[in-house]
Image (cartoon, coloured by chain):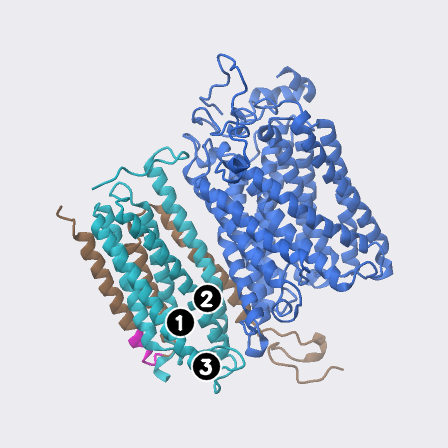
């Protein structure tokens, strides 16, 4: 991709040029920033807090599950643990993660813009997110919620004795932060692309983020109103889900899953977008089937809205509806499969190197595939009847969410870390951490497929003794997984002071974000770049060389 | 007297781009509002399909006169809003201000009528719960739960609209808008018209179920 | 300008049409039209909405992209309504009899089996 950005100064300035990090160092300049890059970092700090609490909840759960008896915590406490884990992970970590951190940071740079379309709205989103988060934390600290992250009525609306409303209010409010972020990204991608960047010259990360934003904007309002309806029933004692008045609790599930199924696509699409960037860069190759991958993102966003009933096969929805939703659920797997095929074909005959981001990307492809395929198991009504509400489901979504999404997040974080901070992380440690994470992850979650298949129910802290061996494996894996996440936390912080200074383009990647300094100046580019060609122009010449020379040699030559 | 247009914001290259972005942004927000109200409409459709008779009986106790007057009020307020935007386009700050104030007053009138109506509804024991009006089937309470929630959320949106348009009116008075720059007025108008459209659907759904049998 | 008052005149005409539709929708609800009461009510609301959206909200003069944004919310709402109602209107249509097919002697699954299982 050609640009007209100057790549070097004619003379070296007397002191370091100002970057977005050094323009204004006061707390106020951070808390009142409208710079998308700083807002991305603000989100990163917030997410760390929520992730840590949710991870501690998971650790306690896995500790309890080492023995078959429910002997570490009471049932009520265990209910609170998995609820806290679910709500905080879904709404306060996974949904904002790539969009609010990497999306905010990278999207304007990737399209050659100076900022998002509505920078003040962007800052407002972060505040709204944390106001919601504070309410969620309040409910966690002052006794917890025990309804499960799904808040099913009538338990949540009538019988639960925990801080349901505080948590629901927190999610309601945080949801508006999500909506505003999605709105911002949609308009940004429509209106702020650099000259020459047509839709089909956009990097695929942008197609994924656009699709994600459409889902955010259309699905989240329904969740907000649904939680409000549930809360109203809880507060006033009458509502629309109350069977005594002729109401149907399953209507809550329809409304809830109308949002929550597309929500899982909010969580995974950005990860897929990151993977497209990583696979092309680290196999030095143009993406295979650009248009297919781009349209697949849109198809996932649209089809994702048509399948929510597969969460309700045994909840009481009609068999006819079950058939329709099952069929549509099979359909929605097709665009995801197309993406996996295309990434694989991109790797084929590419010049592959195994830097840390690539390890995460490769891990994503494998783990997401397993998660996706097991989703097809669940889409079959007959099979779902047996494994629903068992650990099979738990394993399925953790393969996608953790094996897919969190892995992609780690990959993206490593990939753009030099751009964000101006420092390189230690490569060998990065590769080690990726490997540890991969091993720990599989040890944690693969046994859960077996557990579910054998019949262990989810959300139970006491189980039949024959399940113990798999639970012990799973808990052991969880501790290894924890190390896999702790390591990057440590070395990322270490790298801020001691990491090697990063050049503008440490990976020799294409993409406008690499055409500016690491870290970038406040307004991203000295001059607006002009785009004259498609993305991923890892040159044909380079690819040819790759076929005849080992990767290391080729990189040394470039 | 025209003021110079508001400065082009940093992230935009030219004013038309900024205006288009703002308008598309407002439409995106209105799409979220459709889904936000949509969850309530979904509940309504579900239960009206399941309990047509109970819903009809329940709706006969809504005050048709107030509902109809309010619909006329909101439709007229949409007219004044459209005329306000036209005045802004013509750089006519005086009439812009007047039409905005008229719209605000209609909005306040709507809330006033709604307040009277709510007062009467409560006196008629139409608040769901243990003291709900006797003689109606239990499903009628679902209708009334939806009535209170849907009109309540709508009234909240009307209130937000009133505040928004009042701010626009104050800015108009200070000559902040002209034919070259009136985007905030236009987008506030979009919001106000949307609130009207929601009521256009609420009115028949809540007030007009089988009125011939009332 | 010759056309200076044109938009204002059009707006007033639209407003009168809206009030006429209001009277119509009220009037029709006072008459028993059977199932067409619903059709009429929703149809008239849709007509009013079109007038407000196309003219008061200027969508008629906006580029295609705006039309897409305008329709998106509605289309997604229809998705929600359509698929949710596909559950509610088919509840009880197909009922598992809980018995092996050899024993029921029933072809129509909607009718409860009258024979007790062996």
* Inter-mark Cα distance, 3 to 2: 24 Å
Q: Colour of chain A?
A: blue
Q: Earlier in the sequence, mark 3 or mark 2?
A: 2
The quadrant of the rendering that contains the N terminus of chain B is: top left
- Chain letter for the brown part: C
Q: Left of A65 or right of it: where is A83?
A: left
Q: Is residue B175 left or right of residue A540?
A: left
Q: Residue furthest bottom?
A: B135
> What residue appears at the point 36 percent right and 56 percent down from the top-left corner?
B163
Q: Position of residue A532 (x, y in %)?
A: 44, 26
Total count of labels: 3
Which is more toward the observer, A308 or A110? Answer: A110
Q: Which mark is residue B205?
A: 1
Whether label 1 touches label 2, CB < 8 Å: yes
Sooner in the amino-acid sequence: mark 1 or mark 2: 2
> In front: mark 3 or mark 1?
3
Chain drawn cyan in the picture: B
In the image, are marks 3 and 1 on the same chain? yes
Q: Return the residue nearer the eye: A295 or A107.
A: A107
Question: Could you say where residue A465 lies in the image, as x and y percent from the top left?
Answer: 87, 60
**Quick check: can you spot residue B132?**
yes
Q: Against A142, is A246 above or below?
A: below
Residue named by callout 3: B125
Task: Tell me the element at label 3.
Answer: loop
Up-down relation of residue A380 to residue A7 (above or below): below
Residue holding disc 2 = B41
Q: CA distance from mark 3 to mark 1?
A: 21 Å
Distance of mark 1 from mark 2, alpha carbons?
Answer: 9 Å
| Up-down relation of residue B59 to residue C42 (above or below) | below
């Amino acid at each position: 991709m050609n640009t007209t950005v100057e790549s070097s100064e004619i003379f070296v300035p007397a002191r370091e040029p100002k970057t977005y990090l050094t323009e204004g160092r006061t707390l106020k300049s951070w808390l009142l920033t409208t710079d998308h890059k700083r807002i991305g970092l603000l989100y990163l700090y917030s997410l760390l807090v929520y992730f840590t609490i949710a991870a501690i909840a998971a650790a306690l759960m896995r500790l309890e599950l080492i023995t078959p008896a429910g002997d570490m915590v009471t049932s009520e406490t265990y209910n609170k643990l998995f609820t806290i884990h679910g709500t905080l992970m879904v709404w306060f970590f996974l949904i904002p993660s790539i969009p609010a951190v990497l999306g905010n940071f990278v999207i304007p740079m990737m399209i050659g813009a100076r900022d998002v379309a509505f920078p003040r709205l962007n800052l407002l989103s972060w505040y709204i997110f944390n106001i919601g988060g504070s309410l969620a934390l309040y409910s966690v600290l002052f006794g917890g919620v025990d309804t499960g992250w799904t808040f099913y009525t009538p338990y949540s609306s009538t019988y639960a004795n925990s801080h349901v409303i505080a948590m629901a209010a927190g999610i309601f409010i945080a949801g508006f932060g999500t909506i505003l972020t999605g709105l911002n990204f949609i308009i940004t991608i429509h209106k702020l692309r650099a000259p020459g960047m047509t839709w089909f010259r956009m990097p695929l990360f942008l197609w994924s983020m656009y699709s994600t934003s459409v889902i955010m904007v259309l699905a989240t309002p329904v969740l907000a109103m649904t939680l409000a309806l549930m809360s109203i029933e809880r507060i006033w004692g009458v509502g629309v889900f109350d069977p005594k008045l002729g109401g149907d609790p399953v209507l809550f599930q329809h409304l809830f899953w109308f949002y929550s199924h597309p929500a899982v696509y909010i969580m995974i699409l950005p990860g897929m977008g990151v993977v497209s960037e990583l696979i092309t860069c680290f196999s030095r190759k143009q993406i295979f089937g650009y248009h297919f991958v781009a349209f697949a993102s849109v198809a996932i966003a649209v089809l994702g809205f048509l399948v929510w009933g597969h969460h309700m096969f045994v909840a009481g929805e009609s068999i006819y509806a079950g058939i329709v939703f099952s069929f549509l659920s099979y359909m929605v797997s097709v665009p995801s499969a197309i993406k996996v095929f295309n990434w694989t074909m991109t790797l084929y005959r590419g010049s592959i190197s195994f830097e840390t981001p690539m390890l995460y990307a490769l891990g994503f492809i494998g783990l997401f595939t397993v998660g996706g395929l097991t989703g097809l198991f669940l889409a079959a009504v007959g099979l779902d009847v047996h494994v629903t509400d068992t650990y099979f489901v738990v394993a399925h979504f953790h393969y996608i969410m953790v094996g897919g999404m969190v892995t992609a997040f780690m990959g993206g974080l490593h990939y753009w870390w030099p751009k964000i901070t101006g420092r390189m992380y230690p490569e060998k440690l990065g590769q080690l951490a990726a490997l540890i994470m991969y091993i720990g992850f599989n040890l944690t979650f693969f046994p859960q497929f077996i557990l579910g298949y054998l019949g262990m129910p989810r959300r139970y802290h006491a189980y039949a003794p024959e399940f113990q061996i798999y639970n012990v494996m799973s808990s052991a894996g969880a501790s290894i997984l924890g190390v896999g996440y702790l390591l990057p936390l440590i070395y990322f912080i270490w790298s801020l002071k001691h990491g090697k200074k990063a050049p503008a383009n440490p990976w020799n990647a294409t993409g406008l974000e690499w055409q500016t300094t690491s870290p970038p100046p406040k307004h991203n580019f000295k001059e607006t770049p002009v785009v004259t060609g498609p993305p991923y122009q890892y040159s044909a010449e380079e690819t040819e060389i790759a076929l005849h020379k080992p990767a290391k040699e080729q990189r040394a030559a470039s | 007297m025209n003021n110079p247009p508001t400065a082009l914001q940093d992230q935009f290259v030219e004013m038309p781009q900024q205006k288009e972005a703002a308008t598309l942004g407002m439409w995106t927000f209105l799409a979220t509002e459709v889904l936000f109200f949509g969850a309530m409409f979904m509940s309504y459709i579900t239960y009206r399909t399941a309990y047509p008779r109970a819903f009809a009986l329940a709706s006969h106790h809504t005050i048709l006169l107030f509902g109809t007057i309010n619909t006329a009020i909101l439709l007229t307020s949409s007219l004044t809003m459209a005329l306000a935007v036209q005045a802004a386009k013509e750089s006519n700050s005086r009439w812009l201000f007047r039409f905005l104030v008229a719209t605000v007053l209609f909005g306040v009138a709507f809330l006033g009528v709604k307040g009277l109506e709510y007062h009467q509804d409560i006196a008629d024991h139409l608040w769901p719960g243990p003291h709900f009006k006797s003689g109606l089937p239990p499903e009628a309470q679902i209708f009334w739960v939806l009535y209170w929630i849907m009109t309540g959320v709508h009234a909240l949106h009307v209130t937000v609209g009133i505040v928004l348009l009042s701010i626009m009116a104050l800015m108009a008075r200070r000559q902040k808008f002209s034919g070259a720059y009136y985007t905030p007025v236009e987008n506030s108008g979009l919001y106000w018209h949307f609130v009207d459209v929601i009521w256009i659907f609420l009115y028949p759904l809540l007030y007009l179920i089988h009125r011939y049998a009332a | 300008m010759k056309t200076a008052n044109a938009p204002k005149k059009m707006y007033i005409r639209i407003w009168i049409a809206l009030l006429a539709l209001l009277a119509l929708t009220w009037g029709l609800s006072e008459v028993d039209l059977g199932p067409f009461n619903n059709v009429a009510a929703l149809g008239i609301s849709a007509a009013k909405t079109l007038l407000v959206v196309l003219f008061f909200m200027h969508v008629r003069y906006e580029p295609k992209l705006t039309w897409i944004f305008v329709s998106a919310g509605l289309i997604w709402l229809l998705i929600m309504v359509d698929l949710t109602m596909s559950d509610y209107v088919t509840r009880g249509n197909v009922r598992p009899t809980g018995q092996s097919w050899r024993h029921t002697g029933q072809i129509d699954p909607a009718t409860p089996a009258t024979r007790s299982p062996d």
